[in-house]
Structure formats: C-alpha cells, structure tokens
Image (cartoon, grey):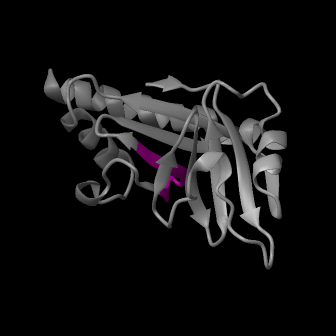
C-alpha cells in the first residue's frame, strides 16, 4: 500500500445541451466503470459527471488541458481535495480480495478490472477503482486521509496475523 501523491484529479461535468466529449481520445465510462488511456484515466461519479486522473501530473495545471479537450464542460481541480491509496498484491488476488471484503461492501466476484464505485469505508465515503486483477485504488477526501490509512493498515495487520 502506498499513497499516490503524484496523481492529478479533476472533475468533469457536462453542461446542459453539451455533447459528451472524448477527452484524450477515449470515451468517458458508463456507470460503475473506469477507463484508462495514454497517461490519463476516468471513472464515472454521477449522471454526466466523471473524475479524470493523470498519473505523475499532480503539480501541473491539468485542469487547463482538460478544458481544452472538453469544450462545453465544467472542469474543476480536485487534486488537493482527495487522497489516493494504491493497493497492489504481488502474490495474486486472494490477499486483495480478503482486504477489500473486510473494508468495503462490494461484491468482489463482479468487481473486476475496469470497475469503479462509490462506497462507504468505516463511515467515510470513498471511491474504489479496480485498476487490474491485483491492483486497487482507494480515493477518499483528504480531510480524512489519516483515518483511511488507519483503516487500511489495521485491516492489513489483522489479515497478516490470521495468515501467520
């Protein structure tokens, strides 16, 4: 587990009457989905609303670039408002599934790569993104980053004790 401090985030919302854009050459995902392109990705957050991610671009003016490729949309900087934790299993999917089953109410059998959802984790709202079979990202409000980290760390330690 690690905090991804280099992830740029921006919200994108269609304005009334606007045509859905294809920023950076990919189609914005449907509900419950996450798509990745060349250095950018997006996940659905609500009707006509998405969060756009860019790895390694947290200190750049990523919003200005999105506004260029998504005319007619409202784009808002989100990088400082969210914390992203990347969770990767190096020994298959079992540890990842065990950890997620302790933390979030998601049917993991139907939550494969390319899926994203909003859920609760110890009374905190967060987004869970399945980036690959062995990689999950957890995004939560920066104001409770410490509490999210504590929940992740505590669940991990409990699972490690169970295995030992």
Q: Is residue 121 visible?
A: no
Percent of width and height locating residue 40: 59, 39
164 or 55, which is in the foreground?
55
Q: Quadrant of residue 46?
A: bottom right
The residues colored magenta run: 117-130
89 or 70, which is in the foreground?
70
| Quarter placement of the C terminus | top left
Relative vertical location of residue 153 with respect to residue 93 in this rendering, above or below: above
Percent of width and height locating residue 137: 47, 39
Q: Is residue 140 visible?
A: yes
Residue that lies at the very extreme toward the bottom in this rendered image: 17
Residue in the image at 47% along x and 58% along y: 117
50 or 153, which is in the foreground?
50
152 displayed left or right of 76? left
Dominant SS of magenta comes to: strand
Q: Quadrant of residue 91?
A: top left
Residue in the image at 23% along x and 33% along y: 95
Residue that lies at the very extreme toward the front in this rendered image: 25
Q: Does 128 appear in magenta?
A: yes
Percent of width and height locating residue 101: 29, 48
Residue in the image at 43% along x and 34% along y: 152
79 displayed left or right of 83? right
| Quarter placement of the N terminus | top left
Count of numbered labels shown in the rendering: 0
Q: Does 101 appear in magenta?
A: no
Percent of width and height locating residue 127: 53, 51
Residue in the image at 69% along x and 41% along y: 9
């Amino acid at each position: 587990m690690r905090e991804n401090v280099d992830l740029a985030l921006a919200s994108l919302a269609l304005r009334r009457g606007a045509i859905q854009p294809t920023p950076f050459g990919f189609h914005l995902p449907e509900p419950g989905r996450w798509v990745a392109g060349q250095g950018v990705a997006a996940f659905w957050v609500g009707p006509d609303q998405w969060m756009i991610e860019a790895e390694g671009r947290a200190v750049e003016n990523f919003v200005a670039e999105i506004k260029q490729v998504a005319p007619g949309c409202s784009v808002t900087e989100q990088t400082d408002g969210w914390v992203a934790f990347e969770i990767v299993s190096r020994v298959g999917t079992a540890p990842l599934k065990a950890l997620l089953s302790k933390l979030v109410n998601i049917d993991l059998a139907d939550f494969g790569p390319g899926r994203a959802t909003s859920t609760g984790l110890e009374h905190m709202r967060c987004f869970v993104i399945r980036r690959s079979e062995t990689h999950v990202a957890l995004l939560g409000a920066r104001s409770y980053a410490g509490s999210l980290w504590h929940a992740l760390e505590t669940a991990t330690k409990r699972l490690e004790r169970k295995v030992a």
